[in-house]
Image (cartoon, rainbow, N blue to C red):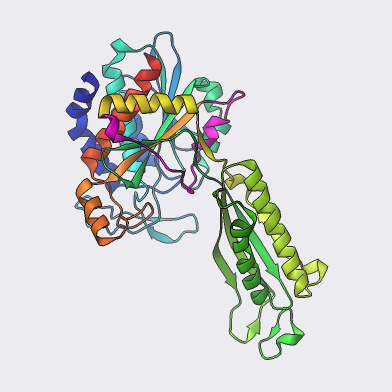
Amino acid sequence: MELKSKVQEELSGLVELYKYLHANPELSGKEINSSKTIADNLESLGIEVTRDFGGHGVVGVLENGAGPTVMVRADMDALPIVEESGLDYASRVVSCDDARNSVGVMHACGHDVHMTTLVGSAKVLCFLKNIWKGRILFVAQPAEESMTGAKEMLKQGLFEKFGRPDYCLATHVLPKLDAGKVAVRSGPVMAGTYQLKIIVRGVGGHGAIPHESRDPVVLAARIITSLQTIVSREFSPLTPAVVTVGSIHGGIRSNIIPNKVELEVTARFFDSEGRNRILKSIKRICRHEALSMDIPDDLLPIIELDEEGELPATINDSRLALIVKDAVASQLGSDACVEAEMLMGSEDFSLFRTGAEREVPCCLFFTGATSANDMETFHKEGINPPSLHNSKFYPPPEPSIKAAVVAMSASALKLLS
């Protein structure tokens, strides 16, 4: 009960911190103020802090005798979305993205809750130093949305400089879960992903004489349609996978057949077999759809895989997930700890599992982010609450932050006691 009392004591200050972070979001790679805010809060607790690690990353080290090392990770970046939540602390920030476009900025993925959870857990664990032994790494990671932040921190030597953790913990808000509840599962929890660009080539010409051309627009349409059969006809119905064409660009006028069309594709999977099967099928479909339209060999589609943006699935260590479940249930009650579903979204937290010579046991659990009253209203209306990356998404601060801090602190204590 000492843990919950400390969280309650700190809650009003944590909510103020959350509102400040929510109102002042920063895009991936630009987390200067967020990074400073987290670092200053950790240093105020006597935690040794390294700033600007792997970009604007923060690493806080709390030593407390001999014992295991637990890493607690939070992400910091926001999204290029104009907020429409109507909150009095809503973001009004406008920034420039990497393409120098002026964009609104919003914490539409809950990273403001995640940062607040990191600081709240640090406050609790510093206060309770008399009941645990070991070492805690508080890692505030930049650029999760661009899927580059974890990779940069590892590339700069996160585990070499600060030591390989024995366990890694993280949380993510979940709008479909009541605020105050926590969801945990063993094994695969979030999908792996990669992105592709498909350059569909043809022979351009006049729209009135298409028989003298090889139309890449028609070919692109056929490829898009055929790609939908990869998951529906090549995967078992019991195996989750996704292939989505999210972008198509080609042509400039209705009566001009262009020379090329560009497609951007995302794939989601849970193991290397699924990953490889999707890629092999995409290559096969592109080649044979082109050949069926008599596209010359030297103009077959080009497939470019974004290797830098590829992520493995997020997989929770079974033993660690059970420890987290027990810790959450002991503090919040068994009714507040539920079984999480697998999600097709992706997380670069997955890279910490394989970021050392030996695999690091990791667990990402979900924190509810919709109030019980709102959830009941949404159910009555037959609609879902605003999702992540939605301009109207907002979690109710008090119950969301309280549950996340209690769950994170209790899990760390369980591992360090």
Residue 195 in magenta stretch? no
Q: Main secondary structure of the magenta part?
A: loop
Q: Residue furthest bottom?
A: 208
Is 101 in front, or is 247? Answer: 247
The range drawn in magenta is 333-360
Where is 189 relative to 228, above or below?
above
Residue 354 in magenta stretch? yes
User: Which corner quadrant of the image does residue 36 belong to?
Assistant: top left
Is 139 in front, or is 233? Answer: 233
Q: Position of residue 278 (x, y in %)?
A: 65, 53
What residue do we see at 45% from left, 55% from top?
Answer: 97
What residue do we see at 61% from left, 77% from top?
Answer: 251
Q: In which quadrant is the N terminus drawn?
A: top left
What residue do we see at 37% from left, 28% from top?
Answer: 325
Q: Position of residue 402 (x, y in %)?
A: 25, 34
What residue do we see at 40% from left, 61% from top?
Answer: 102
User: Which corner quadrant of the image does residue 363 belong to?
Assistant: top left
Is 42 in front, or is 183? Answer: 183
Query: Horizontal placement of 274 versus 295: left or right?
Result: left
Q: In which quadrant is the C terminus drawn?
A: top left
Q: In this view of the protein, can residue 56 be seen by the observer? A: yes
